[in-house]
Amino acid sequence: MKIQISADSTCDLGPELLQANQIIQLPLCVTMGDEVRRDGVDAMPDEVYARVEKGESCFTSALNMADYINFFSEQSRKNDAVIHICLGSGFSSCYQNARLAAAEYPNVYLVDSQNLSTGHGHLVLLAKDLADEGKSPEEIVAALEEAVPRVRASFVVSQLEYLKRGGRCSSLAALGANLLQLRPSIVVEDGQMHVSKKYRGKMDRCIREYVRDRLAQSDVVPTRVFITHSGVEEELIDAAREELENAGLFEKIYVTRAGCTISCHCGPGTLGVLFLAK
């Protein structure tokens, strides 16, 4: 049975993993000033940052119903089944639009990841693993839905300016955090983001403490873990990787760069460690 796995571009898996696993990614729209571009195609995070520094507005928007209809129409003819994993419905209308579009195609299956970035990406790769094992579409969807609450997705944010711009943080809170060198850890739970802990001090020390805290809270699935960042110094990636290697819990450690969706909301200097719990 030929099953095509696909996902919204918010899965942040990067071109190498996408190509290696033959996963199709649908890019969200990115508005930069008066221009509308496509996430990961002709819109990249560093340009978002450059434009924001110049005072331009940059934001992302969901795929519309027509985008999904065009994709599902083509892929449903080429494959026995299509399994599409969407950005969490609590963050975007992507899932709602995809659900309406998929109603016309009985061999198209949808999963609400209830997550973002490589929290979303974990489910995409799990779907591919299960398809390679010969599981049916129904079995794959059931397994993904069971895995959704076991995704452990979180990030440490080095500065709150972008969260302030997006209305997720007050100007006063951002100023206080910057003055006190506070680095909030943002956790995704039940399809929503909230602050779980505020680290204080230099970013490399905060990252090490954050990784140890996250691993201590879960009995992990050892298959893979992601270090996903929005543009950080290599030393911070190395610090996170060293903590993960010292823990000796994971078979594979992947490093990916977050796309425009996470970058537009969190800004540069954000790093997360994302994995599945048992």
Image (cartoon, grey):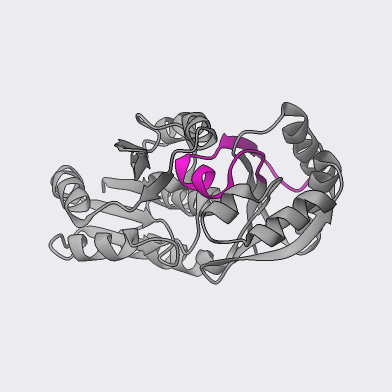
Is there any visible trace of residue 156 in the rendered image?
Answer: yes
Q: Residue 234: where, in percent of width, then height? A: 72, 27
Depth check, front residue: 117 or 241: 117
Q: Residue at x 12, y 62 (%)?
A: 104
Q: Is residue 250 magenta?
A: yes
**Residue 26 horizontal side relative to residue 264, left or right:** left
**Residue 258 horizontal side relative to residue 5, left or right:** right
Judge whether 85 appears above or below 15 on screen. Answer: below
Judge whether 160 appears above or below 54 on screen. Answer: below
- Span colored in magenta: 248-271
Q: Residue 87: where, in percent of width, then height? A: 41, 56
Q: Residue 63: where, in percent of width, then height? A: 28, 51
Point out the image quarter for the C terminus. bottom right
**Residue 225 horizontal side relative to residue 75, left or right:** right
Depth check, front residue: 34 or 71: 34
The furthest residue to the bottom = 190
Q: Residue 224: where, in percent of width, then height? A: 62, 45
Q: Quadrant of residue 194?
A: bottom right
Q: Quadrant of residue 57?
A: top left
**Residue 124 horizontal side relative to residue 271, left or right:** left
Judge whether 227 appears above or below 72 on screen. Answer: above
Q: Residue at x 48, y 39 (%)?
A: 259
Q: How many marks?
A: 0
Is there any visible trace of residue 132 in the rendered image?
Answer: no
Q: Is residue 44 magenta?
A: no
Depth check, front residue: 181 or 24: 181
